[in-house]
Amino acid sequence: MGSLSIWHWLIVLAIALLLFGRGKIPELMGDVAKGIKSFKKGMNDEEETPSQTTSRTVEHKADESK
């Protein structure tokens, strides 16, 4: 049962090519790369947002009529 030989990998590759076609695999990898890039961009935007916002304080005057 052990490890897989080169023939096993070639058969798996042939089946993957039959299922997805030649053009589908590079398209799928391109979509994965775009997803990773947008995820990284979102993480960078999230880190920059709190530092750009300014905090405001609201002063409250106590009611002295009591």
Image (spheres, rainbow, N blue to C red):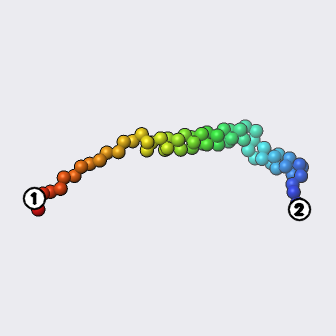
**Residue linked to disc 1:** 65
Q: Quadrant of the N terminus?
A: bottom right
Picture residue at 76% right of the left edge, 38% below the top: 22
- Is 48 rendered above or below residue 64? above
**Residue 58 in picture, x, y percent from top left:** 26, 48
Between residue 37 and residue 10, name the one nearer to us: 37
* Image marks 1 and 2: residues in contact by CB distance under 8 Å: no
Q: Amino acid at mark 1?
A: Ser
Between residue 29 and residue 15, name the one nearer to us: 29
Count residues near mark 1 (Cα–Cα under 10 Å), then give few for <14, some for 14-19, many for 20+. Answer: few
- Marks 1, 2: nearer the viewer: 1
**Residue 11 in picture, x, y percent from top left:** 85, 49
**Residue 21 in picture, x, y percent from top left:** 75, 41
**Upstream in the sequence, badge 1 or badge 2?**
2
Picture residue at 18% right of the left edge, 56% below the top: 62
Q: Quadrant of the C terminus?
A: bottom left
Q: Amino acid at mark 2?
A: Met
State the image quarter where residue 24 is shown: top right
Query: Does residue 35 appear to the left or right of 4 in the view shown?
Result: left
Helix, strand or loop at mark 1? loop
Between residue 18 and residue 36, name the one nearer to us: 36
Query: Does residue 41 appear to the left or right of 22 in the view shown?
Result: left
Picture residue at 24% right of the left edge, 49% below the top: 59
Between residue 44 and residue 62, name the one nearer to us: 62
**Residue 47 in picture, x, y percent from top left:** 49, 44
**Residue linked to disc 2:** 1
Count residues near mark 2 (Cα–Cα under 10 Å), then give few for <14, some for 14-19, many for 20+. Answer: few
Helix, strand or loop at mark 2? loop
| Gap in angstroms between the C-alphas marked 1 and 2 | 88 Å
Query: Does residue 46 appear to the left or right of 4 in the view shown?
Result: left
